[in-house]
Amino acid sequence: MSAYGGFVMNKKHRIILHKKAIAKYVTLLITFFIPIAKGNVILGDELFINKDYSGAYEQYLISANIGSPHAYYQLGLMFKEGLGVKQNIIQSLIWLSLAAEHQQSDSDVVAKQIMQHLQPEQKEFFQQVITRFEQLFGKQVIKQRYFPELILQHLDTRVLFDGDMNLDSYLEILNDTDGATFNGFSTDNEDDASLIDGSDSALTQLNAYSNRPYILVVDHEVAKDGSPRNITKVHTLGNTFRAINYLKMQTLSVPMFKGEPVRFVNRVNMGLASLPKLAMAKNYRDQYSAMRRAVKRFKNAEDLDGLYNYARLALAIEWLGENKEAALKVLTEVATEGHHLAQFELGRYLYREKINPEEAISWISKASQYGLPQAEYELANILQHSPWVKVDERKALFWYEMAAKQQYIPAILNAVKLKLLIQR
């Protein structure tokens, strides 16, 4: 016996090709697909690196159910090498072929190398099995099952805010503008710890603590009534409590699409993040210099994480003075390498700035397939509210529940609401 799907690799045994044999084998392989449960590629990769191949296999298999190209590729390699599973070349070829449809890594090359070692009749049988499997679990099938369906005639129309393309994304809520520096915010700082004693001096210290300059960049949704929802910190330094409360109380311009209110997303810079470059460099020299040094270090990084951090900072904060087109190019390159955080950041940027809704949704979908909870939530939100896709509440609920399984609070709340709405 050999690893080639249990088939003996010699001339005495010929594989009889007929539809029943192929159907039977495909049915057997489908049993490897298990119901969707809590699992993701990110965790699978961690387990794989730590050589917990059985645990990694379980996570990859769950992610394969929703069409993750990376999961397909990893499963193909695991079956090829017998890592955590019994070596099986048919299984390896199937997973690698599914990965190759997404041009994942060198999956096409590896699959062709395996095929070269097969007998002609075996190649024919395996190809028919693979073709049948692609018909059941290929790229287009998975897309129709789980992902948004675009409304092509809407893609050239933009969401507007009182007739403008964007909301005012800068809020200068700075109570302390005398050029003071950050004094540290750790809980073991004596001044910070004394704030809870209730004395007059403590109240004075509390006021000083609250008024320290801060940096805050947040993403948030804008509801149909103009209220900010689901405020998420992107970059933060210092005490931002009052700033976030201030944003929560604002009524913003209502997002409109073809004359109708819609739910949309926005990014806002607050505190020092909202200042022009000249004011920042003059009045907050230490903070400006520190941030510039950090950006330079990330820009020269040789790893994907460093380049990702460079791009997201460069795109978020104007006074860093980085070329946005160059930063966007770096972010795209990192996302193309399979960096799930970069994929999500790129998708959100293209979606929020209304640059390319179709490409934006594609990148967010890729990050969702990795199991990134904020991407899963964003994809659900798009399926429920985006003017550029056909509303599909059941698909939206699926992704809300995927994110909720990872304890992503906004997803938990939305899943409950949507489930009740669907059940009516």
Image (cartoon, rainbow, N blue to C red):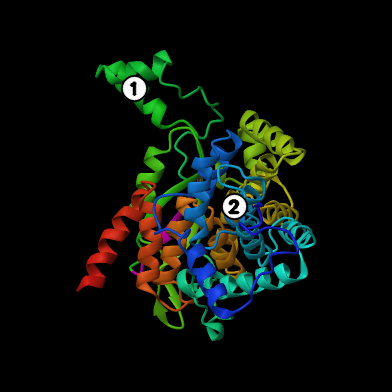
Q: Nearer the viewer, mark 2 or mark 1?
A: 2
Question: SS of the residue at dot 2?
Answer: helix
> Which residue is more in the foreground, 412 or 96?
96
Relative placement, left or right, of 333 versus 214 is: right
- Say which amino acid is labelled 2: Leu
Give the residue number, with chain letter if any, for mark 1.
Answer: 204
Spot occupied by residue 277 in the image (x, y as percentages of width and height):
66, 44
Measured in 3D between alpha carbons, the distance from the residue under mark 2 to the one under mark 1, in whole angstroms, is: 60 Å
Please name the amino acid that badge 1 sits on: Thr
Q: Is residue 129 magenta?
A: no
Residue at 39% x, 45% y is 244
| Residue segment shown in magenta | 217-224
Residue 103 in view (yes/no): yes
Residue 271 in sight here: no
- Asked if residue 220 lies in the magenta stretch, the reply is yes
**Residue 186: quadrant of the picture:** top left
Against 148, residue 319 (above or below) is: above
The location of residue 76, given as percent across then percent down, is 63, 54
The kind of secondary structure the magenta stretch mainly shows is strand
Q: Name the residue rendered at 25%, 16% in the picture.
A: 199
Q: Say what secondary structure mark 1 lies in.
A: helix
Decide which of tag 2 and tag 1 comes sooner along the chain.
Answer: 2
Q: Give 112 or 89, whichever is nearer the viewer.
A: 89
Q: Residue at x 44, y 55 (%)?
A: 220
Local crowd size for mark 2, using a 10 Å CA cut-off: few (<14), some (14–19), many (≥20): many
Residue matched to label 2: 75
